[in-house]
Image (cartoon, rainbow, N blue to C red):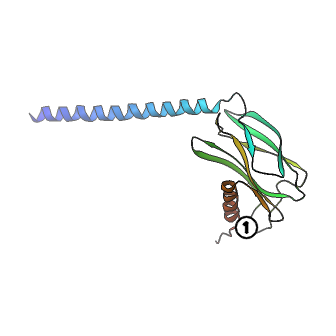
């Protein structure tokens, strides 16, 4: 009788272990196929802007290795330099952003886009139906413009980048 119970227990553990491995591999394969579907776009998503003094000059979908990214060329039409700017998209309820920032803990902020000049910023992990948003900007004179959530992100990054680290 004991041998029979041990055999049943051994088979049950084997079945559970096999099922766990099978479903683990199946879930990983499904996730990889969803990511590959998401990364192949036929055209650039719509671009929106919350900014008055920064204009989109050119935008294109480019290949970078195995992924596609948006290359957005922006022009600073203000009379003062840009010290921080954010571009973002929301894909599957997850905010993905790139913030170009000139803040450092021990120096005055550097200009990332001088007045009247252009800069190209790239943003990856795009979604076909997820608009790209030029979200917020901070100028060298202390003024800001943009959408509330983007301004919050830029301010948080500024606070992080200007914080002095103690050894």
Count residues near mark 1 (Cα–Cα under 10 Å), then give few for <14, some for 14-19, many for 20+.
some
User: What residue is at 11 percent from the left and 36 percent from the top?
Assistant: 2
In depth, the one of 73 and 64 nearer the eye is 73
Percent of width and height locating residue 122: 74, 43
Q: In this view, does 133 lie above or below 12?
A: below
Residue 133 placement: quadrant: top right
Q: Is residue 132 above or below residue 164?
A: above
User: What residue is at 79 percent from the left and 67 percent from the top?
Assistant: 107
51 on left or right of 95: right
Quick one: quadrant of the N terminus? top left
> In the displayed image of the protein, which residue is found farthest to the top?
42
Quick one: quadrant of the C terminus? bottom right
> In the displayed image of the protein, which residue is found farthest to the bottom?
166
| Label total for image | 1
Residue carrying label 1: 105
Percent of width and height locating residue 68: 69, 34
Tag 1 secondary structure = loop
User: What residue is at 67 percent from the left and 48 percent from the top?
Assistant: 97
Percent of width and height locating residue 111: 83, 58
Percent of width and height locating residue 69: 71, 37
């Amino acid at each position: 009788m004991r041998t029979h119970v041990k055999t049943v227990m051994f088979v049950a553990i084997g079945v559970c272990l096999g099922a766990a491995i099978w479903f683990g591999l199946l879930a990983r394969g499904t996730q990889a196929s969803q990511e590959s579907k998401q990364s192949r776009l036929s055209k650039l998503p719509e671009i929106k802007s919350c900014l008055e003094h920064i204009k989109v000059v050119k935008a294109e979908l480019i290949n970078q290795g195995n992924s596609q990214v948006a290359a957005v060329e922006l022009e600073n039409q203000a009379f003062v330099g840009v010290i921080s700017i954010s571009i973002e998209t929301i894909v599957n309820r997850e905010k993905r952003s790139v913030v170009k920032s000139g803040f450092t803990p021990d120096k005055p902020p550097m200009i990332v886009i001088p007045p009247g000049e252009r800069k190209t910023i790239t943003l990856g992990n795009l979604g076909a139906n997820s608009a790209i948003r030029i979200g917020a900007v901070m100028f060298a004179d202390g003024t800001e413009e943009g959408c509330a959530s983007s301004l919050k992100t830029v301010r948080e990054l500024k606070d992080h980048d200007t914080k002095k680290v103690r050894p």
